[in-house]
Amino acid sequence: MTDSSATATHCPYCSLQCGMRLSGGAAPQVRERADFPVNRGALCGKGQHAAALLAPAARLTTPLMRDRGELRSVSWAVALDRVAAGLSAVRAEHGADAVGVFGGGGLTNEKAYQLGKFARAALGTASIDYNGRFCMSSAAAANRLAFGLDRGLPFPLADIPHTGCLILVGANPAETMPPALRYFREVREDGGTLIVVDPRRTRTAEQADLHLQPLPGTDLALALGLLHVLIADGLVDAEFVAARTTGFARARAAAMAHWPERVERITGVPVAQLRLAAHHFGRARTGMVLSARGPEQQSKGTDTVGAWINLCLATGKAGRPHSGYGCLTGQGNGQGGREHGQKADQLPGYRSIEDPAARAHVAAVWGVAPEALPRSGRTAYELLDSLGRSGPEGVRALLVMGSNPVVSAPRAAHVTARLRALDLLVVSDVVLSETAQLADVVLPSTQWAEETGTLTNVEGRVVLRQQATAPPPEVRSDLWILRELAERLGGEGDGGQHPVTRVRFDDDPEAVFAELRRASAGGQADYAGISYDRIRAEDGVFWPCPSEEHPGTPRLFLDSFATPDGRARFAAVGHRPAAEEPDAEYPLYLTTGRVLAQYQSGAQTRRVTALTDAVPGPFVELHPRLAARLGVAEGAPLAVVSRRGRAVAPARITEAIRPDTVFMPFHWPGPGRANTVTNPALDPTSKMPEFKVCAVRLEALQGERERVAGSGERI
């Protein structure tokens, strides 16, 4: 029975944005919401325990300011005055671009929009980007190159069971978005084929008809080899290629240079498996390729995703029902967060900040002159790397909203040092994250059940999270914080390149969304026809939706692609190695990822007892043969060492991983922080760091004493 007094809302975690209900007032309980079509009542453990983070003991309840090295409680007036004064001082001395803003893929659309507006119109800075750059930026770039438009899935999740062959590349939804696993199981139940590509035999791979287990960093070669087989064995849809695509000749030439035997040598995937996968996909009447962070978090991630898109285009499995390429976006608002202005190069509506028409449109909505808007800024890692540096390229003050780069950024020890070098670090967050612990000022913000706002899920469905409970007395919304800071900054400019005028900032989410609708109108991500009332009535609305009469767009590209000529573009790409390959000193591959009970940097889930009991800390996953060579037993401490640092965690021995590869989850700080060792090498197009592959060695430890060179054993 449904509790009629319960508030219909959505889970605060992944991009499924599963429907749930909250009841119980001050101590709300999570209830099933079977009528929401995405999860149909199902919730993973994180969703089931989401309300635990609302308890005062788990979260920030008052502003904090650093005093003689310690963070101490202060009033909002004192905290905000300190922030505004610090930002103004840095801007006056070093220029507007010396003030940086770093956002998050979990912010609501309203917050993401307002944060971008605050950076450009209140601060006048180009120095803004967000942690979503670390999540799906390579797939976004490849989507735009191939199709002219980026949306995580160009079709609803409900279409997945009806496809004839599904290839999941570097995705583990059994642990990252468990309620979606039913869709992949239903592919097989309906007679289709499920193929999983992953260096590990994950819980998802165990569901597959065929598991391809390539060497980390070789997904591009694997996709090229599959296209080679499709071409050589006559499985190309020549009519579709001629009618709806361009660039096949160059893509064909690149693929023919990657014959199966060569691809086997590069990837370790046997030729027989390569041919079997290609034939399953090529002969199926319909088919999909879905990727996640595996192929995307590489220094060649855009090219890699482009090569997988090529398979859909060559076989006519794009722009047709129950077919196409999609990206399984990770963060809760990973899709909406990249559409409305917190990316370094974008304005609301997925507009380019360099486009004069886009600048004029958004400037008119904000009430500023187009020339007052800054140009493109540095992307996430580049921005973090610039922190605290002297000279015109340095960012001296940083506002962080809803992100924890101390744990989530690559080469994390270096990023931590850069954060410490700032003149002013301000963090607005729900909890005292590891990044907040370094801050000069910490601003406690409302969280999912304490505020109303929209998010855009992996399907492009705009949903509404509704306030179900009141926040603690001294907690404020991010929209209120931005409004108060903008008022204190008072429209002061830096006297130079980026004059700033007084701009209105509303803190009512529905009013902010109404402005977002106007700012996005006419853009690729057009929300003009979406309203709170309509979302409530329709279980969400799919963008683009340019008018209130428009039905929304659950399925893209059925008539044409979003390119100028309406044709999809093949990617002419060739394999190249990872930025860092194993050698004599660092002979193993490290790959990283998530586990079921934790989420992203773990700042929230590590505070929930039921989740930490399930997976209390980091671990190093390695093959039994590698463990035997090192003389390591299950649970023994291991150091994973790269050119950037070392992480220490217990060994977890399993045959589910390749013998030449080790795996670490990235949810924890401290000695087990996986991102201490990861490589910040960037994809030249998306600027995605290469989280998924770097060269490491293992060092076995004896108790608290490390075995070092000359006295210990290395592999």
Image: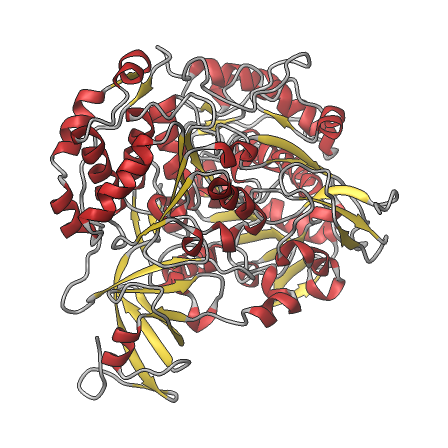
**Residue 11 pos. (x, y %):** 66, 47
For the point 70% across and 31% down, the residue is 539
**Residue 620 pos. (x, y %):** 38, 70
For the point 71% across and 61% down, the residue is 52
Nearest the eye: 331 or 704: 331
**Residue 538 pos. (x, y %):** 71, 26
**Residue 142 pos. (x, y %):** 35, 31
Answer above or below: position of 253 versus 622.
Answer: above
From the viewer's perspective, tell me whether residue 339 is left or right of residue 506.
left
Nearest the eye: 378 or 11: 11
Asked if residue 190 shows in the view, the reply is yes
> Where is residue 444, by image quadrant?
bottom right
For the point 54% across and 69% down, the residue is 615
Placement of the C terminus among the 4 image quadrants: bottom left
Which residue occupies the extreme right position in the image? 5
> Where is residue 228, by image quadrant?
top left
Asked if residue 368 shows in the view, the reply is no
Answer above or below: position of 191 versus 297.
Answer: above
- How many marks on residues? 0
Which color scheme is applied? secondary structure
From the viewer's perspective, tell me whether residue 202 is left or right of residue 697.
right
Nearest the eye: 274 or 305: 274
